[in-house]
Amino acid sequence: MYIIAGLGNPGNRYEHTRHNAGFEVIDILADRMGICVDEKKHKALCGRGALEGQKVILIKPQTFMNLSGESVRAAADFYKVEPENIIIVYDDVSLEPGQLRIRGKGSAGGHNGIKNIISHLGTQEFPRVKVGVGEKPKEMDLADYVLSRFSKGEQEMMDQAFLEAAQAVSAMVGHGMDAAMNRFNGKKKAEE
């Protein structure tokens, strides 16, 4: 069994912001799997189904980004899922908009949601899909930037990136980390 957690902030105010990239990917996976992610459990919205022949739990933590680990840990404990089968999908300001990076482990890299998950799971060794949202402008506060929405031009690129991130998660579940990394890491946006 896999837990696939997309990170973001709950509520209409935060919909379609850079920080909610993980929620966008979960919505695409749920749509493909024909399930709803609306069951309130584990401080998250959850949905259960099958992906690539494996049982999966999709979760959108409702704790706000900086406390994402509370929700991920609660789901992991309940379903008895080890960290290596917990895939976290989230935004990354160090990657160009639309660029994906899959990793099997690593530090938080300044991302507070990941920092909290590492703290709650007690390990950095869990797979993740980072979705590039672009570097913040120098004159802008990081919090304001990640809570901003994409420009029209960026949105088209990001919609493609969210689709590819969902495909990457499917590849991770169905074919393993190495295959997914070989296929998706460093891949540039659709227009290139």
Image: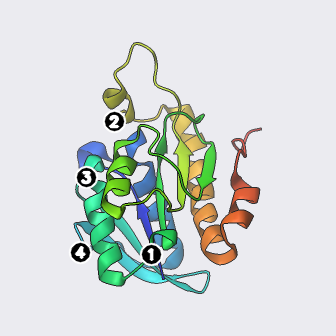
Taking the view exactly as shown, the residue that stands out farthest to the front is 122
- With 32 as the anchor, is 57 left or right in this view? left
Q: Is residue 179 left or right of residue 153?
A: right
Q: Nearer the viewer, residue 183 or 10?
A: 183
Question: At label 1, which amino acid type do we have?
Answer: Glu
Is residue 51 visible in this depiction of the protein?
A: yes
Query: Distance from label 1 to label 4 (Cα)?
Result: 19 Å
When the figure is inspected, residue 19 is found, relative to residue 151, above or below; the finding is below
Q: Which residue is mark 1?
A: 82
- Tell me the number on the disc at residue 67: 3
Q: Which label is found at residue 41?
A: 4
Q: What SS does tag 2 mark?
A: loop
Measured in 3D between alpha carbons, the distance from the residue under mark 3 to the one under mark 4, in whole angstroms, is 15 Å
Total numbered badges shown on the rendered structure? 4
Residue placed under numbered mark 2 in the picture:
147
Residue neighbourhood size for the residue with mark 3, other residues' Cα within 10 Å, grouped as few (<14), some (14–19), many (≥20): some
Residue type (three-letter) at the residue carrying disc 3: Leu
Sort mark 4 into few (<14), some (14-19) or many (20+) by Cα contacts within 10 Å. some
Which image quadrant is residue 105 in? bottom right
Measuring from the top left, give residue 50's x and y in whole percent: 51, 84
Marks 2/4: CA–CA distance: 25 Å
Q: Nearer the viewer, mark 1 or mark 2?
A: 1
Q: Secondary structure at mark 4?
A: strand
Amino acid bearing label 2: Leu
Q: Secondary structure at mark 3?
A: helix
Q: Nearer the viewer, mark 1 or mark 4?
A: 1
The mark nearer the N terminus, 3 or 1, is 3
Along the line of sight, which residue is nearer the eye, 65 or 112?
Answer: 112
User: In 3D space, how far apart are the residues under numbered discs 3 and 1 (Cα atoms)?
Assistant: 19 Å
Label pair 2/4, CB-CB below 8 angstroms: no
